[in-house]
Amino acid sequence: MNKLPEKVLSVALAASMVLSFAACAKKGGSSGRQQSRSGKKISADTPWFEGREVNIDVDIDTSKPLEYTYSRLAGVDDNYIVVFTSGSYKMPDSNTIDWEHFNYNDYSFYTVTTIDRNTNQTINSVNLNDGLGQSSYIEGATYINGVITVTKTDYNDLTYEMTSTQIDIDPTTGNIIDTRESEYEEGESNSVEKSFQIGDYKVDTSMNWDNNDESYYNLFVYSPDGDKQKVKVKESGVSIYDIPVILALDKTKALVPASTNSDPIYFELDLESGNLTKLDAKDYEWLDLNNIYSVTNGKDGNVYFVSSTGISKIDMKGKKTEEVFNFSWCNINRSILNYLEMAECSEDSFILAGEKYVSSPYERSNLSDFIIVELNKVPNPHAGKTILEMYSSYGYVENTVGDAIMKFNESNSDYFIEVSDRYSDSGDYDYSNINSEEDWENASLEINANMSNQLAMDILNGEGPDLLLNVSNLGQLNNSNYLTDLTPYVGSLSSDKYFTNVVDASKVDGKLYNLPVSYMIDGIHTDSKYAGASGVGFTTKEYEKFLSETLNGTDVINLGQATYFARLFSAMSDKFIKNGKVDLSAPEFEQLAEFVKDNVPETGLTWDEMYNQGEDDDYVTTYAVGSALFKGDRAGYGENVNAVYTNCYGISGYFSEIVQLQGATAILGLPSTDGRGPMIEPYVSVAISAQAENVEACGEFVKLLMSDEVQKELAMNDNFVLNREAFREGGKTAVAYYNTDAGKEYFGYYTESGDPISNNISFSEKNIDDLEKIISSVSMMYSADASINLILVEEMPAYFSGQKDLASVSAIAQDRAQKVIDERG
């Protein structure tokens, strides 16, 4: 990649000293744990793995209607793969149940399935429900050293005691080999979370909580002669939320690293005595605990683990981890691999197994597929190509995007897209004190400011990624020094075929830095009769009336004054920041500030307060600012709800809210000075670095995401897309599905009497017409500049509390914001 001129870079370096959240050298960038592979040539000896996907049938009675199933890998050896499956069948109507004699286990199922490694055929399946009482359940199962170990929990209704029983089972015959019982200590669980083989010892982990709501772990250490001892891993004042791996230090000692709500803690465990000794954390900083999953002892004696982007090897002597397989280095869609556990590994082959998560929302099935993926090293068919690095947080890409990456790599003779996550360091943020949407919003701003700075600095220095996936939330990057204008690669779009207004709304100062390939709609879902004069939103005066009359004074935007104001500012930022100039003296700024001061509480409700309000009040409001960031969450519940703040992710979400709101179909904009419509927030977006190795090659991938094929696939997977025809085709399919009994069951909203709210709701193409009008009314893309918003969050309370007048506050905020923007170049 090319470097920018020294003058521009020096300005950027100065900016990094001034901004509140400077780039962290611990991870990411040129001094972090990964280096950019952009521009590197794929050599003949660069690893490549040919993948084979095998579907495995687990033993479930599919003649009964299923509620859900969940299968996970119990373990693997040279002969067998063992799968543990749990789930439940649909229960009868509650009015027909004899509750006095009802047994939940009549509708649950637990099985372990043994699969032959050579043939991939099931050779034995054990029904674990036999002998389960009404208050019994199966915690889980592991397969180590040729033995299946099932953990069963029994609860005594008379003595209130819980007993844990471990049952050893022969994988080929299903015969019970041994049983071991142990009394639960009060308040503790013996549920096995993970198992590790350390030489001749086996160590199981179990998570627990103490009276202070601090989590800790119990380790159950099994010696070669079968003795068991319990070791408590606990640190006062600290919550330990994961022990991702246990590693051998020698034959009788192990390293126990613990992820906490603060810094990681490391212990030495004496496997013979059970003694635990705290170690110096500095000696193990090279272990990235936030990125270690599914640990396996390899056939070659090394320890391997699955990360968010591939498989790595732990080198204890060299004190490092080395990536030996990137999910980009095979012919299997990486979005499938992301969800699998490692079954077996060596440097030349890997076996991954688990449930296959591929969305088919309009053909919903409660029976998931359990798959095995075999990967074997072969000569690299892409040798000679140049790598284009695509950054994606946590290495995740949507399934359709994964297909597009594979198609690009197969068809392009010169370039190869490789996904990385080298800036995903938000796992270091302490989330333990977050208890409100306001806390979540402010935490997001801090994380985004930090991430923006890291990416911006590396891009300027020629060390950033070429393509950036889903970074539209990092508004700082909307600058020609950092990102390329995508307009030439999108081309001249016809408004008859595309929602061109969505593309226009995504532009900043006339340039398209992030293309919303698919998107969510951010606004207030309510009845269209409540809209202001614009028909698509509210002026601040109109929203005051809506708030007092329709919402009974309880706002659906659950944020305190400063954060509320920053969100409204972002929805109108085009009025205040133009071509790099900040103007907070505009009358629109004053109007927003006065509205917030007069109508918004100093702080929003905490999640605890919201929960209690939902129980006690007849009027239930819904808050979905933070939670709606995760696709699939619903925006509310209950009766008498006539408005919700929504980040509507697709047609199923829109229909679900219509049911909840008993027929309301409008999504309106947030309060503004001009009554503008809702915003869009990309679900899948793509950007190109201004310093990309080859902008034209990256542009070809952008064009691929705009293709009819990709747009249709996204639409059929419950996404709002740019292509109108694909949108309508997905909409018609959704209407047909959600008018069926199975479709109506999806919504799950009930009246106090227990009747489904959806009984009297049916959908038609008019709903799709309504959605099309909503999409056509969007005003802009939500792409907050976190550093600017944080300045407003810091400065505006002085005005809201009456300590300073608005002119003084806005002058200080404007000066600070302008300096930040100027220092970016």
Image (cartoon, rainbow, N blue to C red):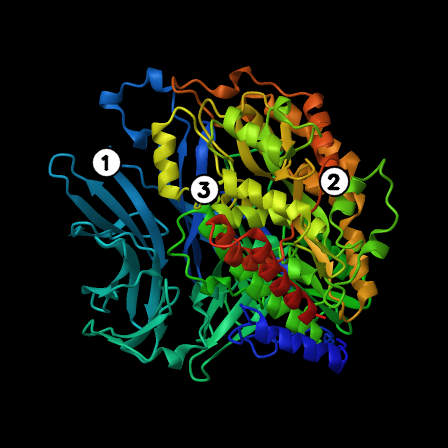
User: Pointer 3: what residue?
Assistant: 601
User: Pointer 2: what residue?
Assistant: 712
- Name the quadrant of the C terminus: bottom right
Task: Tell which circle, 1 or 2, labels the residue nearer the N-terminal end.
Answer: 1
Count neighbours of disc 2 (C-alpha within 10 A) and say few if under 14, some if 14 to 19, many if 20 or more.
many
Task: Tell which circle, 3 or 1, labels the residue nearer the N-terminal end.
Answer: 1
Q: Circles 3 and 2: CB distance less than 8 Å?
A: no
Locate residue 19, reporting x and y percent. Answer: 57, 69
SS for callout 3: loop
At x 55%, y 76%, the residue is 32
Total numbered labels placed on residues in the image: 3
Locate residue 419, reporting x and y percent. Answer: 65, 63
Q: Nearer the viewer, mark 3 or mark 1?
A: 3
User: Pointer 1: what residue?
Assistant: 135
Residue 46 visible in the current orientation: no
Residue 669 visible in the current orientation: yes
Q: Amino acid at mark 1?
A: Ser
SS for callout 2: helix
Q: Nearer the viewer, mark 3 or mark 2?
A: 3
Distance Cα–Cα, label 3 vs label 1: 47 Å
As drawn, is 670 to the left or to the right of 89?
right
Distance Cα–Cα, label 1 vs label 2: 48 Å
